[in-house]
Amino acid sequence: MDDKDKITVTSPLLPDLDEFHSMLKEIWASKWVTNNGQFYKQLEQALCEYLKVPYISIFTNGTLPLLTALQAMRITGEVITTPYTFVATTHSIWWNGCRPVFVDIKEDTCGIDPHRIEAAITPNTTAIMPVHCYGMPVDMEHIQNIADKYGLKVIYDAAHAFGVEVNGKSVLNAGDMSTLSFHATKVYNTLEGGALIMHDEKTKKRIDYLKNFGFAGETEVVAPGINSKMDEVRAAYGLLNLRLVDDAIAKRQYVANRYREALRDVPGIRFFEDTPGVRHNYIYFPIFISEEQYGCSRDELYFRMKEHGIWGRRYFYPLISTFSTYRGLPSATQENLPVATKIANEVICLPMHSSLSDEDIERIINEIKRP
Ligand code: T4K
């Protein structure tokens, strides 16, 4: 198969090159390339408005905000999370010297099952880190009630939830903090990048210190910080991409609807419908294969598609709880995680991005429908 015929799971949203070039010229003229530059400040402001959040701090990627949020809140001991996510979620807990405690997910969102959280709480639990997996909002009210009851912090890994709203309100305002990823593979990207969303100015100030080595002034260091500031080049790129993101989401919605229409009657294939009241961002289009009804296994379909140039991805297989670092944890057993185990064995994320053509979509659908 020719590489040009290959359809990948995603493709980055790219700004107009001439416009980007003009902004690069401004950066070159100013000779200010990082550390709180003009475009950086503009991007933080523009993102607050677009995302309907009060405060944001932008980062070099989506992993460092997770690490920094845990540091900022001095989280210790055990952190409740799920194994059905990208490894960055769990690694951020581990890198902070904490122990992840895995709780199973719900089939209708692939997010944490709030009904199973209380049973996982011990005297060492200090926080919950839920994930809005595929941008599907988890039950934030239920989670907050549990957190309030036990005095726990809630940090949302909202890497997939750029622009996702429930009844007109951003999901990024839930909990104590939420993180975003602006990686090239996301709905909105700054090449690499990410952000932390918080509720008040004091916390933003502290986060800004932490991501700048802990500096609170020229000579004062208030914490063992790290370097995770976004530079001017990526901030400029981000400002341009922000203008394109609504159209990109609309195009993704079109792709999702084409998939849904075509696959609704295929036995053994499930997918998410839109949730009433939710503004989805269509970051991924996962389908779940029931081998018995579909007639072949997830992996058979996955490799057949690949053979024909359609590179879906099995996000998130294998489960994080099966990796060597984590499989010895008491919460990592298959018996504790029946839904996550099942879903991880059924999922394929179909190609989903704003530059898919009608012919591409047709090719993908035909491959899935092929007997
Ligand atoms: N939390 C969650 C829940 C996350 O999903 C992620 C990241 C994070 C935290 C951490 O955020 P970051 O630190 O990454 O900002 C990708 C991404 O690297 C990762 O950002 C993402 N989640 C994860 C789910 O997927 P890979 O290893 O699958 O990506 P890769 O390089 O195989 O790319 C996938 C496809 O995308 C390629 O086949 C083609 C296309 N692509 C990719 C790149 C990089 C392009 O067309 N152009 C490109 O430049 O991890």
Image: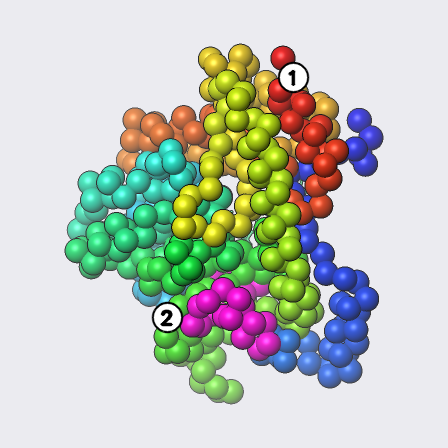
Residue 331 sits in quarter = top left
On the image, the x and y values in percent for residue 203 come to: 38, 74
The image quadrant where one finds the C terminus is top right
Q: Give coordinates of residue 135: x percent, y percent.
A: 47, 48
Q: Which residue is mark 1?
A: 370
How many residues crowd mark 2 within 10 Å: few (<14), some (14–19), many (20+)?
some
Residue 66 visible: no
Residue under numbered circle 2:
199
Q: What's the amino acid at mark 2? A: His
Q: In this picture, is 72 found above or below 134?
A: below
| Mark 1 CB lies closer than 8 A to ligand 1 | no
The answer to whether residue 65 is magenta is yes
Point 50% across, 24% down: residue: 269
Name above or below for residue 208 compared with residue 364: below
Q: Which contiguous range is marked in magenta?
A: 41-66
Q: In screen coordinates, is 160 left or right of 156?
A: right
Position of 329 relative to 147 (above/below)? above
